[in-house]
Amino acid sequence: MKRIIIFLSIVCVCVSFQQKGNDNRTRFFPEEELKVTDMPNKNNLWVFILAGQSNMAGRGLVEPRDTIPSKRILSINEKGEIIIAKEPLHFYEPRLTGLDCGLSFGKKLIKHIPYNVSIMIIPAAVGGSSISQWLGDSIHRNVPLLTSFQEKVGIGKAVGQIKGILWHQGESDAKEDLIPLYKERMAKLFEKFREITGEPELPVLVGTLPSFPKNYYHKMKINEQIKLYALSDNNTFLVDTSALDHKGDKVHFNSKSLRIMGKRFAEKYIKEEL
């Protein structure tokens, strides 16, 4: 009997700890979703798509500042309905989703564009996805990657103008046998992205992989491939992440770094396109 009581006590403590952890992660998730009823003119809505794996999907801790809305920054919900953007933007992995760089990108960018222009940030990144899975339209974590991207492009084109893609991916390809293939696969994927959007010169902003100690050597080799590709494509622009920090797992950016990364993506777009 004592053993049963002890066992049940341990289970209760574990469950309580897990719930507390989940509550901490979702503590400041918005409780209210603000749907957009008065859409901007199509020519005055600039659409950007977030794609890649977990560091674009976002694993940071959402804080109150990340849920302060701007009527000029829109997004979509899981049903594809247009809403006022609040973090977290991604919804594909509800047990993992956290802060990404999208809202900080939008907040920085709206300071540098005409006051009558709004921004729409569409989430399409899925954690753990490799570039070959994107190319093959694989179903990864219940998401058909390229089909989902195409659907999101369709939503964006129906209401605005596709202005760019924010891409961060490569950790899943940071393996000895995959590194030499990365540049060619990136070229093919970005060609597909541009074909889907109907914009052959669409800007793609690419974040380099962070210099966290886990698998450092192979990630830096992926960065070499990314930089080589960017030199061959006048419409691909690098966003440096080397000085940013992780959230303790040596894999994912922390909240402060994600906000900085979003600003850096915006600064690169402002420099190259405005």
Image (spheres, grey):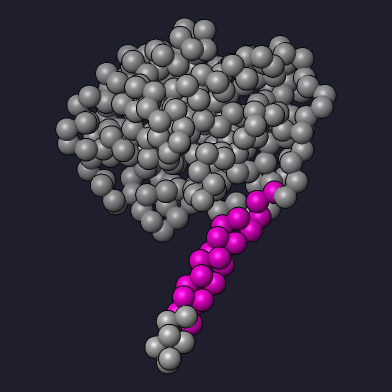
Residue found farthest to the front: 1
Residue found farthest to the bottom: 2
Residue displayed at 70% across by 28% down: 82
Residue displayed at 21% across by 38% down: 175
Toward the viewer: 202 or 270?
202
Q: Which residues are magenta?
A: 9-30
Q: Quadrant of the C terminus?
A: top right
Percent across and percent down for residue 33 are 74, 41
Up/down of 271 relative to 168, above or below: above
Number of marks: 0
**In the image: residue 27, left or right of residue 258:** right
Residue displayed at 41% across by 45% down: 243
Percent across and percent down for residue 272 are 51, 19
Up/down of 194 relative to 212, above or below: above
**In the image: residue 214, left or right of residue 167:** left
Q: Quadrant of the N terminus?
A: bottom left
**Magenta stretch: dominant SS?**
helix
**In the image: residue 30, left or right of residue 257:** right
For the question of whether residue 258 can be seen, the reply is: no
Percent across and percent down for residue 21 are 53, 64
Percent across and percent down for residue 68 are 72, 45
Residue displayed at 65% across by 32% down: 79
Q: Is residue 26 magenta?
A: yes
Toward the viewer: 187 or 31?
31
For the question of whether residue 48 can be seen, the reply is: yes
Q: Is residue 217 magenta?
A: no
